[in-house]
Amino acid sequence: MERGERAGTGFFVDDAGHVLTARHVVQACGRIMVQKEGRTSAARLVAVSTPYDLALLKTAKTRGLAATFPRSIASAPNGIVFAADYANLPTSLARGAMLANASVGTTNGSDEAGHIALNTNITFGASGAPVLDSRGLVEGVVSRKTAVNRVLAVGAGGAKAFLAASNVRLQEDDRPQISGSASRAHRAASISARVICLN
């Protein structure tokens, strides 16, 4: 990584090139780039969320697939989910992929309202990554680490409201987007991208 550069993860939310990521990943950037499968393209900041750590970017086109959100929110304590930074997804796939690497914990207090807590050891660079349930649906967006093995993610409800307010026509469905034996790492790789902030 070059000096004055930081990176996170984002994911495509429609077929028009919109990418959702964490606001702190793209805060105070001179230029924003989105990288997927060896291709890098410029992105512009379209909107930021005031209540949540979310930002919406626009690129020229969607690469891969657009994410699908659940119509009804289903994340519950002890639910098993998957989240990973884009840079580590190839490793997960090479190891035979991964079904899950996090479980849903309980949130504490009003400052965590609208979030889901994850018990996980996901690595630096996962900010903005989608949190996928067993159906391959987006249950949240990784926001920040609060302890060694605890991460907060903005819940799907807050993410969907932010996208709707930004006039993004997101996809919603309660049907599985992956087959029962398919890996969530493959689904994450198909919708995710690396987000690079250049100062």
Image (tube, rainbow, N blue to C red):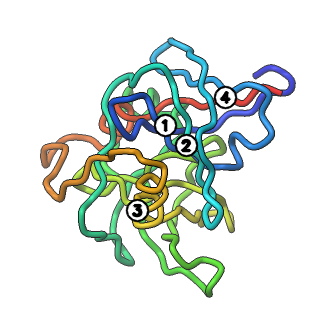
Reading the chain from its start, which is encountered first: label 4 or label 2? 2
Question: In 3D space, how far apart are the residues under numbered discs 3 and 1 (Cα atoms)?
Answer: 15 Å
Q: Residue 12, how many percent across, how many down?
A: 41, 36
Work out which quarter of the rendered image holds the C terminus and state it.
top right
Question: Mark 4, residues whose alpha carbon is within 10 Å: few (<14), some, or many (≥20)?
Answer: many
Q: Residue at x 59, y 63 (%)?
A: 151
Amino acid at pointer 4 = Ile
Q: Visible in this render: residue 7?
A: yes
Badge 1 vs badge 2, beta-carbon distance below 8 Å: yes
Q: Which residue is mark 3?
A: 156
Q: Residue 39, how many percent across, how many down?
A: 51, 12
Q: In the visual, does 175 lie left or right of 135? A: left
Question: In 3D space, how far apart are the residues under numbered discs 1 and 2 (Cα atoms)?
Answer: 6 Å
Q: Which residue is mark 2?
A: 56
Q: In the visual, does 99 lie left or right of 30? A: left
Which residue is situated farthest in the bottom direction here?
Answer: 109
Reading the chain from its start, which is encountered first: label 4 or label 1? 1
Amino acid at pointer 1 = Val
Question: In 3D space, how far apart are the residues under numbered discs 3 and 4 (Cα atoms)?
Answer: 24 Å
